[in-house]
Image: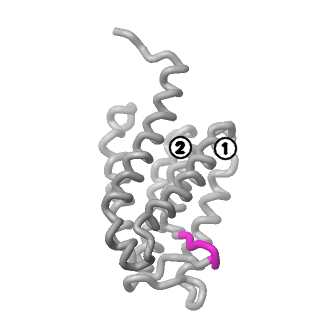
C-alpha cells in the first residue's frame, strides 16, 4: 500500500476545496440564470456575486494556510467569548436583522454576518484545544449547550439541530479515540 507523501496530501487539501468551489460556481450559474435576469437584469448576477466571495474565501484560505494553526489554541477561549458576545448582540433590537422571522444577522452596511456560523468555527477551535488537555469534554458540552440556547433564541432551530448532530458525532467517535462511550 502506497502512502501519500506530505506534498501530495497538501496538494489534495488545496485541490479538493478549489474543485468543490468550481462545481458550486457552475451550479449557481446554471440554477440562477432566470431568477437573476428577472430580478437584476443580469443573468450572471448571482454567479458574479458568488465568484467575488469565492475569491475572498480563496484569499482567506491562502492567508490562513500561512498561519501556524497550533497558535490558535492560545486564542480559543477569547474567540469563543467574542462569539458569545456576537450571539447576544444579534438579539438586540435595532442591531440584529430579522429575515424570514429569525433574528440572526448583524448588518454591517456593506455586508451582513451571521454569528451562529462563526460559532461553528470557534467551537471547533475550542474543542480542539480542550481535547488536547484531555478530560475536558464536559466543559465543551456545557459551552455547546449554552451556545445552542443562544442560537435557539434567534430562532434558528435547524442550525441548533445541526450543532447538536455534530455533538452526537463526537460521542460516536469517542470509543475510537480511547475514551469511554
**How dense is the environment of label 2, judged by Cα within 10 Å: few (below 14), some, or many (20 and up)?**
some
Outermost residue on the bottom side: it is: 93
Point 57% across, 51% down: residue: 55
Point 64% across, 58% down: residue: 79
Is residue 111 highlighted in magenta?
Answer: yes
Q: Is residue 18 above or below residue 126?
A: above
* First reached walking from the N terminus: tag 2 or tag 1: 1
Point 32% across, 51% down: residue: 168
Residue 159, position as x, y percentages in the image: 38, 66
Label 1, on which residue? Answer: 63
Can residue 143 be seen in this snapshot? no
Q: Label 2: state its secondary structure.
A: helix
Q: Quadrant of the C terminus?
A: top left
Q: Image check: 70 left or right of 11?
A: right
Q: Is residue 68 above or below residue 88?
A: above
Label 2, on which residue? Answer: 128
Span highlighted in magenta in the image: 108-113
Amino acid at each position: 500500500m502506497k502512502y501519500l507523501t506530505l506534498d501530495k496530501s497538501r496538494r489534495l487539501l488545496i485541490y479538493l476545496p478549489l474543485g468543490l468551489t468550481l462545481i458550486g460556481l457552475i451550479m449557481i450559474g446554471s440554477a440562477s440564470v432566470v431568477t437573476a435576469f428577472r430580478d437584476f437584469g443580469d443573468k450572471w448576477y448571482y454567479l458574479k456575486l458568488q465568484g467575488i466571495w469565492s475569491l475572498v474565501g480563496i484569499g482567506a484560505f491562502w492567508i490562513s494556510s500561512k498561519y501556524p494553526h497550533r497558535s490558535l489554541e492560545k486564542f480559543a477561549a477569547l474567540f469563543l467569548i467574542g462569539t458569545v458576545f456576537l450571539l447576544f448582540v444579534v438579539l438586540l433590537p435595532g442591531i440584529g436583522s430579522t429575515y424570514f422571522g429569525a433574528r440572526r444577522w448583524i448588518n454591517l452596511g456593506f455586508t451582513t454576518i451571521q454569528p451562529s456560523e462563526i460559532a461553528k468555527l470557534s467551537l471547533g477551535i475550542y474543542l480542539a484545544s480542550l481535547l488536547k488537555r484531555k478530560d475536558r469534554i464536559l466543559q465543551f458540552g456545557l459551552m455547546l449547550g449554552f451556545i445552542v440556547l443562544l442560537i435557539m433564541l434567534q430562532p434558528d432551530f435547524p442550525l441548533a439541530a445541526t450543532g447538536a448532530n455534530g455533538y452526537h458525532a463526537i460521542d460516536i467517535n469517542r470509543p475510537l479515540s480511547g475514551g469511554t462511550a
